[in-house]
Image (tube, rainbow, N blue to C red):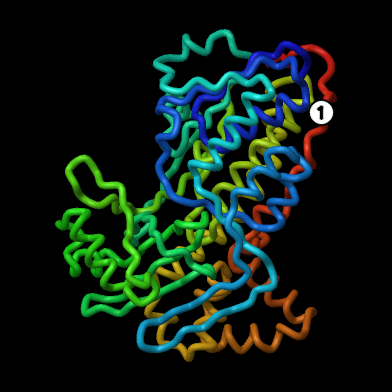
Amino acid sequence: MGALVKVACVGGGPASLYFSILMKRVDPSHEITVYERNPAGSTYGWGVTYSNELFGYLQGADPESARAIRENSARWDTWMVHVQDRMTATVEHGDNGYGIGRHRLLDILTERARSLGVRVEFEHEIAGPEELAGADVVVAGDGVNSVLRERHADHFGSEVAVGRNVYVWLGTTKVFDSFVFSFVATEHGWIWCYGYKYSDDHSTCVVECSPETWKGLGFDRASETDCLALLEKLFAEILDRHPLIGRANADGSAHWLNFRTLTNRTWYHDDLVLLGDAAHTTHYSIGAGTALALADAAFLVNALHGDTRLQRAFARYERERLAVIRSAQRAAGNSAQWFENLPRYIDRPPEQMVALLDQRHSSLLPRISPALYYRIDQVSEGLEPLRRVTRWMASKVTRTPHAGAAGCDDHAAPPPQAGTGAGSPPSP
């Protein structure tokens, strides 16, 4: 792509903002506008997670925003598994994890984009395609419910798989020292939460359970206030009397959801290209969503500046990302199913349960007994050839290569280089 290319990004999430930053770094002459329908600072959500590997990639792509993200992140180097009245285990996994508030992340990316000359317009909803008629490239970064994508739903071949379990995304003033998995038995079944800090004074707490447990505990008919009170009681041991914080629906009910995994047959149509959650979603239990969205942004920038023909650039972007995304979605789907089948694993001896939790993204685990999988994993831990065979077996189960929970980092795009834009605007 050459100079004076006009780009419209619809949706002001991390993917769109990071894409605009990298596009401007490659060629400052690009005219880029990010349209966000909501007011500044009105984002939902609490904290998002990322790994050392992702930070290394961000540092190479745009050191300034990477530095700000790191400085505003909370860090942990252990994870804790707590099963009520049974065990508490702390695991040192040898790598750092990081959390940052979604609001703070968006502020950092917005400020950086504007400093490079990107126009970021809040409270600007795109009512129709005529508003974008002058753009050479239209980036749909407007999330899982993308309006731009839905206008061409048949072309994109969008499909949504709805998860069985229900979950609610909450905050808390309890600052967890480790990444926490906490499981509590009730008379109606198991309920559990994932907890991680994202600032000096807050953590994210995602609560999940089966629909039977959800109804049995009365969450289907309770107000958010009553839901939070019961959840605070159930998870009192890990919350240390700290409150949970929610965001109620308009009718006062808690914001319980079923996770929706989105896939698309293709990611582009004419001058329109999908990015981040508008293109794909992965179950939150592997914590890869933000990393995948930022990687999408980098791959799209590289593709656009690697070919002056727009359709070929889009095709390259789709081809390079689809393999990674499908692998990550398989891993996330396996992880989601692990929790949907929690009774299969929760009663194992503590050391087995912790190991199986760590391997929940495996394609092989659901297809053999947990005890056999654990024995194979323990034996192969010190034998790399056998571990490779185990991975090969898992891949054959799904007929495609298997990626781990951090599989999104296996195919990171090389950082775009500033000042490499040349030639004329791409043609369709």
Amino acid type at image mark 1 = Ala
Q: Nearer the viewer, residue 155 or 224?
A: 224
Q: Nearer the viewer, residue 194 or 141?
A: 194
Q: Which residue is mark 1?
A: 418
418 sits left or right of 88 in the view: right
Asked whether residue 270 is in view, the answer is no
Vertical position of residue 304 compared to residue 192: above or below: above
Callout 1 secondary element? loop
Residue lying furthest front: 200
Q: Residue 245: name its quadrant.
A: bottom left
Instruction: Give the residue at x 63% y 42%.
Output: 294
Residue 405 location, x and y as percent? 60, 62
The N terminus: image quadrant: top right
* On-image quarter of the C terminus: top right
> What is the quadrant of residue 17 in the picture?
top right
Residue in view at x 58 percent, y 83 percent: 373
Q: Position of residue 98 (x, y in %)?
A: 60, 58
Q: How many marks?
A: 1
The residue that appears at 26% across and 72% down in the rendered structure is 233
Q: Nearer the viewer, residue 313 or 61?
A: 61
> x, y (%) of residue 254?
25, 52
Q: For the point 22% across and 75% down, which residue is it? A: 188
In the displayed structure image, the side of residue 156 where residue 213 appears, left or right: left
Give residue 230's position: percent from left, percent from top: 23, 67
Relative to 349, is 107 above or below? above
